[in-house]
């Protein structure tokens, strides 16, 4: 057995021989690798057994491992499902990581009694919902949807009102199914027409727009004709009328390319026998994995997150070792049989070869892009070292920003750049306590510094600390940083003139706006600002959406929604009797009494305060 600590050694010896999932952890308790096994004892033992052929990646993982956790399962299938969920949740350092350049949106038409339509990037298998996409032209998609919703106005709202139509109805963007303004038969005709448009079956709308465009042109109304032309283009951009590649078919085609330590995957989507879209993924640091391991990891990662678009068949360049298990897992998620096969001949073989060629072209282009970025970022880091008189290259930079709402809901952010690029797993956000209600950016910055450098001792020390602001922010932060025993250089970047302030100098450094070193500092400063603003808005929105009903025992999201549906206002709810409250959907007498007593208690407290105020006068 290789050199591991006593804790791991004891756990390995006592492992069961059942199926399950194992998790290696580092000294900070962070999960660094997740794996599954048919036999936990045999699989985990293979990591700590002496092996001269062990890959450098596995050797590094074992060196950093400080603890081991396991979860036993009844079957290998259960272990696979748990493994997928944990990798998706934890993003362990040593598991294969897929990086998608873009997340493209889909159009979802729900399977409800009165279906609704909306754009989403979150794919879920939920009954009879339909998804169309992915769409690379997001602007064209939204323009097309606006036109489609005017021609076929179906609902977009989450919950249907029953008392009166909403604003969408009066704007002509909804037919008011909640209030009986349209028959179910007519409504479903609209839904079918929309589905036909996205499936390329409905050409009537385009023909109508073409006629309108010609008439406008004949009347020399060229602006109106141009508007119709743009609408035609928008509709054509979303219609899935690509070249037919099969008489029928519902399958995905996966291509794989490898070069050095990087791999790339290209996936084609074929639906109704037509090529409807494709996506690219790059997989860094994958030189030690086999093609079969990469394909297996991709299938688990991609379809684990996108169960709603699992096809009947997945065409792959090589068969994973766990092919049958993956087919069983995919079939279970899809709800019908799914095959994972290598096409050997015919048009499917041609599609697989095309996906392989596309993946190779994508990887070649990405490597050229990375080489350019590496050269530019390396040059920027070297220039920063010279300009700021740094003791070493700023390979790890940490930047901080503060956001608040007139002193309330104060938040802070830390973003990390390594080798000139964002290291998003290292980002941190802070909910600040010292200045609530009193806007004070300097005290807030000091609190963030204390929590970062005084509390989190196990985090690596930066080569450069960047503050969003000038001398005042630096003067507030530096004493705290030094008091925590951190001697990393600190600079401030003032927004107005993009001036760089350094320690022990009141005179700022001003760089040419085209200087890559300045652009790198602006990038990290803007990223810190984006990150803190996003967090602040999320926190603010969460606080604003909290309901008074959240404070009542037994009232959760479903009952809260039912109460608002049953009563038009909070005043009506307050006046309601226990019997009336019980009539709301999902309510029982005990919870209805809780609601009734809650409002009576608040009323009594309010009257008591008023009475005491009157006495004091």
Image (spheres, rainbow, N blue to C red):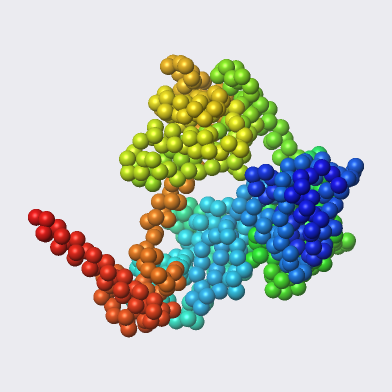
Q: Nearer the viewer, residue 575 or 163?
A: 575
Q: Residue at x 40, y 74 (%)?
A: 562
Looking at this view, name the residue that lies furthest to the right. Answer: 52
The percent position of residue 259, horizontal first and vertical second, equals 81, 41
Q: Position of residue 605 (x, y in %)?
A: 23, 65
Along the line of sight, which residue is nearer the eye, 261 or 174? 261
Given the current orientation, which residue lies at the most extreme left position?
617
The answer to whether 275 is drawn above or below residue 57 in the figure is below
Q: Position of residue 429 (x, y in %)?
A: 50, 43
Residue 64, placed above or below residue 331: above
Residue at 51%, 73% (x, y): give it: 115
Residue at x 53% of width, y 52% of height: 139
User: How far across and down, in percent of the image, does residue 484 sit?
Assistant: 52, 30
Considering depth in this image, is 258 or 16 the residue closer to the camera?
16
Q: Quadrant of the C terminus?
A: bottom left
Instruction: Place residue 53 in its image quadrant.
Output: top right
Residue 470, quarter of the rendered image: top left
Residue placed most toward the observer, 253 or 533: 533
- Seen in the picture, residue 420 relative to 216 is either above or below; the reply is above
Q: How many marks?
A: 0
- The answer to whether one can see residue 519 in this image is no
* Side of 303 where 401 appears, left or right: left
Is the residue 530 above or below the residue 141 in the image?
above
Query: Residue at the location (51% across, 54% down)?
Result: 230
Q: Is residue 433 visible?
A: yes
């Amino acid at each position: 057995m290789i050199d591991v600590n006593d804790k791991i050694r004891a756990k390995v010896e006592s492992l069961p021989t059942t199926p399950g999932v194992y998790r290696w952890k580092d000294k900070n308790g962070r999960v660094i690798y997740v794996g599954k096994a048919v036999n936990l004892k045999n699989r985990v033992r293979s990591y700590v057994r002496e092996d001269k052929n062990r890959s450098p990646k596995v050797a590094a993982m074992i060196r950093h491992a400080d603890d081991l956790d396991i979860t036993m399962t009844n079957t290998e299938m259960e272990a696979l499902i748990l493994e997928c969920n944990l990798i998706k949740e934890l993003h362990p350092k040593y598991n294969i990581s897929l990086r998608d350049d873009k997340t493209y949106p889909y159009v979802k038409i729900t399977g409800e009694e009165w279906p609704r339509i909306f754009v989403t990037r979150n794919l879920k298998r939920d009954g009879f919902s339909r998804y169309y996409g992915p769409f690379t032209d997001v602007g064209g998609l939204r323009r097309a949807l606006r036109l489609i919703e005017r021609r076929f106005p179906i609902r977009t709202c989450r919950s249907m009102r029953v008392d009166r139509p909403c604003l969408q109805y009066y704007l002509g963007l909804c037919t008011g199914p909640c209030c009986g303004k349209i028959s179910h038969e007519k409504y479903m005709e609209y839904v079918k027409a929309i589905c036909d448009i996205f499936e390329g079956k409905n050409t009537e709308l385009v023909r109508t727009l073409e006629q309108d465009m010609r008439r406008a042109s004949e009347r020399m109304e060229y602006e109106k004709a141009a508007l119709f032309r743009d609408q035609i283009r928008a509709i054509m951009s979303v219609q899935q009328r690509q070249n037919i590649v099969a008489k029928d078919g519902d399958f995905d085609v996966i291509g794989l390319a490898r070069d050095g330590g990087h791999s790339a995957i290209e996936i084609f989507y074929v639906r109704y026998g037509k090529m409807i879209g494709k996506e690219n993924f790059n997989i860094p640091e994958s030189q030690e994995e086999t093609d079969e391991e990469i394909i297996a990891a991709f299938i688990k990662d991609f379809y684990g997150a996108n169960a709603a678009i699992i096809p009947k068949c997945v065409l792959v360049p090589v068969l994973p070792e766990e092919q049958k298990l993956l087919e069983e897992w995919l079939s279970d998620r899809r709800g019908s049989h799914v095959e994972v096969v290598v096409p050997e001949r015919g048009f499917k073989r041609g599609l697989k070869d095309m996906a392989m060629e596309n993946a190779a072209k994508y990887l070649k282009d990405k490597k050229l892009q990375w080489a350019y970025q590496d050269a530019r970022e390396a040059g920027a880091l070297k220039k920063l070292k010279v300009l700021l008189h740094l003791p070493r290259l700023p390979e790890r930079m940490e930047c901080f920003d503060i956001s608040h709402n007139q002193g309330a809901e104060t938040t802070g952010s830390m973003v990390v750049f390594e080798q000139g690029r964002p290291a998003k797993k290292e980002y941190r956000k802070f909910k600040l306590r010292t200045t609530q209600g009193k806007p004070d950016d300097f005290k807030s910055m000091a609190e963030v510094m204390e929590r970062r450098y005084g509390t989190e001792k196990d985090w690596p020390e930066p080569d450069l600390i960047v503050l969003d602001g000038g001398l005042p922010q630096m003067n507030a932060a530096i004493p705290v940083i030094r008091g925590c025993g951190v001697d990393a250089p600190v600079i401030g970047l003032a927004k107005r003139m993009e001036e760089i302030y350094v320690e022990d100098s009141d005179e700022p450094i001003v760089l040419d706006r085209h200087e890559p070193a300045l652009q790198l500092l602006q990038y990290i400063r803007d990223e810190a600002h984006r990150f803190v603003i996003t967090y602040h808005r999320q926190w603010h929105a969460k606080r604003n959406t909290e309901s008074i009903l959240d404070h009542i025992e037994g009232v959760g999201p479903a009952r809260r929604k039912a109460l608002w549906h049953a009563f038009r206002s909070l005043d009506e709810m307050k006046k309601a009797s226990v019997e009336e409250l019980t009539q709301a959907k999902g309510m029982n007498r005990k919870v209805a009494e809780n609601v009734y007593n809650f409002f009576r208690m608040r009323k009594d407290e309010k009257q008591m305060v008023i009475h005491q105020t009157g006495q004091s006068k």
